[in-house]
Amino acid sequence: MSNSISKRKREHIEVINRDPMVDRQGHFFDAIQLQHRALPEINLEDVDPSITVMGKTLSFPLLISSMTGGDDQLVKKVNRHLAEAAQITGVAMGLGSQRVMLKQPEAELSFQVRDVAPDILLFGNLGAIQLNNGVTPEQVKEMLLKVQADALFLHLNPLQEAIQPEGDTNFAGLAARIGELQAALDYPVVLKEVGAGLSVQDIELGLSQGIKWFDVAGRGGTSWARIEQHRRKDDSQLGFTLQDWGIPTTVSLQQARPYMQEANFIASGGLRDGLDLIKSVIMGGYLGGVAKPLLAPAMESTAAVVTAIESLKKEFVTAMFLLSAKNIADLRLNDTLLLPQQGINK
Ligand SMILES: Cc1cc2nc3c(=O)[nH]c(=O)nc-3n(C[C@H](O)[C@H](O)[C@H](O)COP(=O)(O)O)c2cc1C
């Protein structure tokens, strides 16, 4: 079972590498247009994109979204390169699902990144469905302690599980288990999707269970339905039919707007450049998460990841300058930065 988890992670990466269309390139962020300032009245050098989240200061609001980990040569180096780059560039990082750690102690090493990334905001990760399979809050606490995480990403992936040949699809009663977990943990639990978005009903259920952080992880980027379709052995087209199922990240953020006083949001799913990131922050995200675009650099080297992150930062800072935004507080939920017909709360 445990070996099969590591093998599955490897297969996911192989599918992503050979089928470019698993990145759905939804371009939903292109529909959001920003208010250019010809007289920004600020010095580009004075732009400060830093932000403090969960007590940690980041150089700009980027999250390397959860990807991988496990006892496989291909995936082992990925977390290491990502973590080293996160430390160098001062951004946050999510580990991939730590479920494999519960079954296979050898896999633990690939999640240990604090030696190279002592200062970063680091998220552990587990599929919420595991709470219906007997994983206890004590086990989750131990998992987080072992990797010295600051918080937990608890992922919700009903679409992926429904397409995955060996998928777990009993999501009944899961919200109550999530509430029990949050009550038992001193760590913030961040409820996240994996590319199909969170609905208003999902957010309300999370809030009712004491959850204060959400990552909408919406549609537009990596499609898990399409990835899992490639792993199916039957003749069905289920994953292709559902490859564009879900709520676009931009729409999920708009729908979350009324809840942004009582809860905190992260945006991910299809963010592909610094402009998508700045739009996410304007629309209320404390962080914007990027996964797939950082996978190929992470398989190459730490330097390649640093280069990719620095490009994102340059784009982000240049856009801040052109919006006359000196700091993140000038961006957050500032509707005047959006072209009028694109207003996000109309
Ligand atoms: C190779 C790969 C592995 C992933 N593994 C996980 C995972 O273990 N746990 C999780 O919560 N999300 C996982 N994700 C989902 C991402 O964290 C993210 O929510 C989603 O891919 C959308 O971002 P993107 O369009 O930038 O790829 C993975 C994504 C990729 C590309």
Image (cartoon, helix red, strand yellow):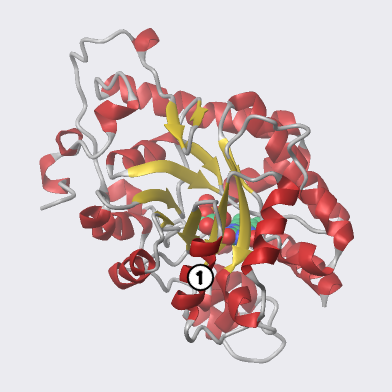
Count residues near mark 1 (Cα–Cα under 10 Å), then give few for <14, some for 14-19, many for 20+: some
Q: Position of residue 143 (x, y in %)?
A: 71, 57
Location of residue 40 by image quarter: top left
Location of residue 83 by image quarter: top right
From the viewer's perspective, is 171 left or right of 235? left
The total of numbered circles placed on residues is: 1
Q: Is residue 346 visible?
A: yes
Q: In the image, what residue type sits under mark 1?
A: Glu
Q: Quadrant where the N terminus lies?
A: bottom right
* Vertical order, 223 against 107 (above or below): below
* Vertical order, 47 against 77 (above or below): above
Q: Quadrant of ligand 1?
A: bottom right
* Vertical order, 107 against 93 (above or below): below
In front: 152, or 255?
152
Q: Is residue 17 visible?
A: no
Q: Position of residue 323 (x, y in %)?
A: 25, 25
- What residue sits right under mark 1 in the picture? 180
Q: Which residue is drawn at the image coordinates 48% and 86% (left, top)?
A: 172
Q: Position of residue 54 (x, y in %)?
A: 47, 39
Q: Which residue is drawn at the image coordinates 57% and 54% (left, top)?
A: 152
Location of residue 142 by image quarter: bottom right
